[in-house]
Amino acid sequence: MSDPAVPRRFDTALTRHAGIEVPLICGAMYPCSNPELVAAVSEAGGIGIVQPLSLTYVHGHEFRAGLRRIRELTAKPIGMNALIEKSSRRYHEQMTRWVEVALDEGVRFFITSLGNPRWVAERVHAARGVVYHDVTERRWAEKGAAAGVDGLIGVNDRAGGHAGPRAAPELLDEVAPFGLPVVCAGGIGTAAEFAAALRMGYAGAQLGTRFIATTECRASAAYKRALIHARDEDVVLSERLTGIPVAVLDTPYVRRVGLRAGALERWLLRTRRTRDLMRTIYALRSMGRLKRDLLDEHRSRYWQAGKSVGGIDAIEPAGAIVRRFAAAAAGAAGE
């Protein structure tokens, strides 16, 4: 049943593809995507995206059981993020199993990242589902379109995590010629910024940082307080987590260890014979660091955040954010 507080006149490619009321995605976040947060955004009319490693490794659910836990909280559509970079055969096989389980549990909206999405698109389309692909510039959009995806997530230079190099208007102009709907990802912390993205021509918006500062997210109170007090300029790019720049808050620890990977590490990451091994080492190390920093009230080493923090001034229920953003966008459109 539709929430009467949510405007009903949104009609974008994203709302049609995902079967949702508000063109708003709670992006998949490692380690922040716990079941209660995913469900709350979907229940309010947007769509929450499951991040498999967050669900299993961080929040302790067997994958199928975790999906069913979300289903206990909402019957509305949810999505899944498939990180498809083939860093190892074992990881690819695990991701393939997770996609199959998600389809078996009724998930029909998928977001792919970091690789060629063809195999996901073919499998999901066979089940009458939809696939959107993360892109940061034209060449990745071209590969996604060639692989048959249904839409693009345009990750701009204000996003948290692995941000792109382009500003939101520039990125939209660059990837729009492929004729696929594009979702704006990055820099949206207020209802006015959401409305502006829709006016710009985006089919919707994906938020991450804004949904960390919610009552449902299991991030520590210290992490949430830091988001409330941070300004956009407090977000810096650090290579220390994954070997490539990741947007994080400028904590005392980050300042102490610096932002650049060591010269040897950078060389190993650029060398074909050692690149995959180094990425695996970085991934395992960063997974542990981010998990500890998420849940421990006394750790403040690496807190991921995008340049939307300046618009975050309170910890709120996720549903209240969805409804407020929807009302502002509807008002701006003259509803």
Image (spheres, rainbow, N blue to C red):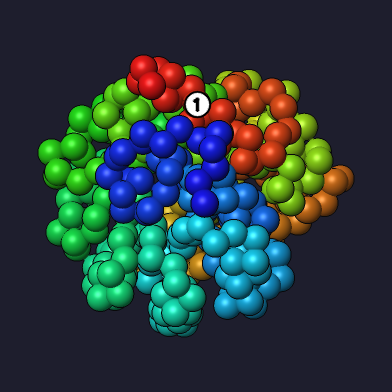
Residue at numbered disc 1: 327
Count of marks placed on residues: 1
> Residue 295: x and y, percent?
78, 53
- Residue at position x 35%, y 50% from top? 134
The image quadrant that residue 258 belongs to is top right
Tell me if mark 1 has few (under 14), some (14-19) or many (20+) residues whose alpha carbon lies within 10 angstroms of its own.
some
Towards the viewer: 253 or 74: 74
Q: Is residue 26 visible?
A: no
- Name above or below for residue 76 compared with residue 247: below
Tag 1's secondary structure? helix
- Name above or below for residue 69 compared with residue 239: below
- Please indicate whether residue 121 sits to the left or right of residue 232 in the image: left
- Residue at position x 60%, y 21% from top? 310
- Please indicate whether residue 58 sits to the left or right of residue 43 in the image: right
Towards the viewer: 305 or 320: 320
> Residue 253: x and y, percent?
74, 38
- Residue at position x 59%, y 59% from top? 74
Towards the viewer: 44 or 284: 44
Q: Residue furthest right?
A: 298
> Residue 126: x and y, percent?
25, 75
> Residue 309: x and y, percent?
60, 27
- Residue at position x 69%, y 39% from top? 317
Q: Is residue 192 visible?
A: yes
Disc 1 residue type?
Ala
Towards the viewer: 304 or 14: 14
- Please indicate whether residue 212 sits to the left or right of residue 325 in the image: right
